[in-house]
Amino acid sequence: MISTATARRGAIAALALSALILAGCSSTNSTGDSTGDGGDGGAPNNLEADIAALSVGTVDQFIEMSEVCPDDAEEMTVGVVDGYGTNTWSKTVLAEIESEAAKCPAITDVEFVAGRGDLEATTSGITSLAAKGTDIILVIPDAGPGEAHLPAIRQATDAGSIVINFASDPQGEAGTDYLDYTDQIPQFVGQSKAQWVVDQLGEEGGNVVFFGGPAGALVSSQEFEGAKEVFDANPQITLVNDEPITTNWDPAQAQQAMAGVLAQGTPIDAVIADYGASASGIIRAYEAAGETLPIITSTDDNSLSCGFAALKEANPGYELATVSSRTWIGRVALRKAVAAFQGGSNAEPSLYELALYEDSTGTTDGAITPEEACLPDAPSDATPSTLLSSDEIQELFG
């Protein structure tokens, strides 16, 4: 059981629900016109919709696109701006959004902008889509600190676009700066991973290193904060770094960074990575150094799942736990935006409590083993927890 993370669920949910109340964005649209005033002279309905904004829940509360996209739906255009946009995770996220959009014939176009880690390019992408009159703009604000994206997000909202952020916290205020933000709860994920590490290392404890993405990426910092809370309550654990080690979510950079850690000579008993492909790079660093693997926890990645058995045979102490990479989160953002544009409702949660998806030790309730997660016919960089079909995965990766 993930006792520490579970104990904090109430507090996290209460905070998120309090934010919902403060945001004031749960009233129902009266029209599908995203630039209208809601018919009553009030706030533009691109800031006011019955979509359970900032609500907390679990993945078993997903709905179908057909519930928010009726046969007579008004035509919509969609833009997706990803502050990074170039790695396998981003490509899978876009494929999931396109897959979901295909279920709604009223969506006539999905345009994609990759920020490539450049804040100016990312914010320009947001404002350019808005200037073209794009009805729905979905934003991953991770090209820098979340709040750095807010001026562009506000500009797009003022222009009449329905803006929903996902996968990285934009800061700001839902219902004022944008319509909603949907994601995992990174602190909860950090707690889940950290508690697994504590459980595996036991009373003896040990040294743990934490790898994030780009410098300053809020999703990495928030997950790190959640992990640190657990480790602070377990003094037998030493967190070696005082902030996430930068990898830019690039396996080669993660390998180089791990090589640097190993060169310092400090024994490492556990590694936490906020991206599965980074964990693959970390493993390569250990192999290159001729050192035995420690326990590792990250997000799911097919190379980790399918390669676990062979690595375990060569490294008896190696264990793996993952949380879903939530490449599906853009589907939720799209469904909420469609509901808002069409003047309908959507009661899906915005913020998701994600427990462990895989646990090689078999000790976490509800988690599956790496062997069960492995997609044997999919590429090594596929995401086992994706909602893409087998055919869609093959089409994406070739």
Image: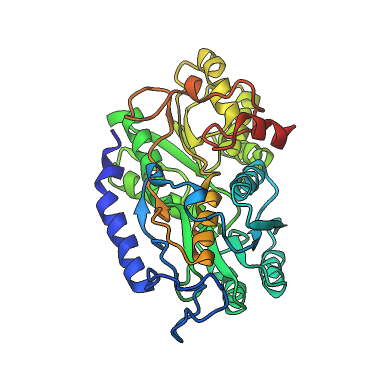
Residue 248 locus on image (x, y percent): 63, 49
Question: In this orientation, which residue lies closer to the viewer: 294 or 220?
Answer: 220
* Residue 215 visible in the snapshot: yes
- Quadrant holding the C terminus: top right
Name the residue at the right extreme: 398
Image height of 70 relative to 355, above or below: below
Residue 145 locus on image (x, y percent): 56, 64
Residue drawn where x is 62% and y is 26% of the image: 289
Name the residue at the front extreme: 72
Question: In this orientation, which residue lies closer to the viewer: 383 or 349?
Answer: 349
Image height of 298 relative to 247, above or below: above
* Residue 204 visible in the snapshot: no
Residue drawn where x is 51% and y is 44% of the image: 326
Image position of 328 (left or right of 361): right
Image position of 115 (left or right of 33): right
Image position of 385 (left or right of 106): left
- Quadrant holding the N terminus: top left
Image height of 269 relative to 66, above or below: above
Residue 324 locus on image (x, y percent): 48, 39
Residue 40 locus on image (x, y percent): 43, 84
Image height of 377 relative to 208, above or below: above
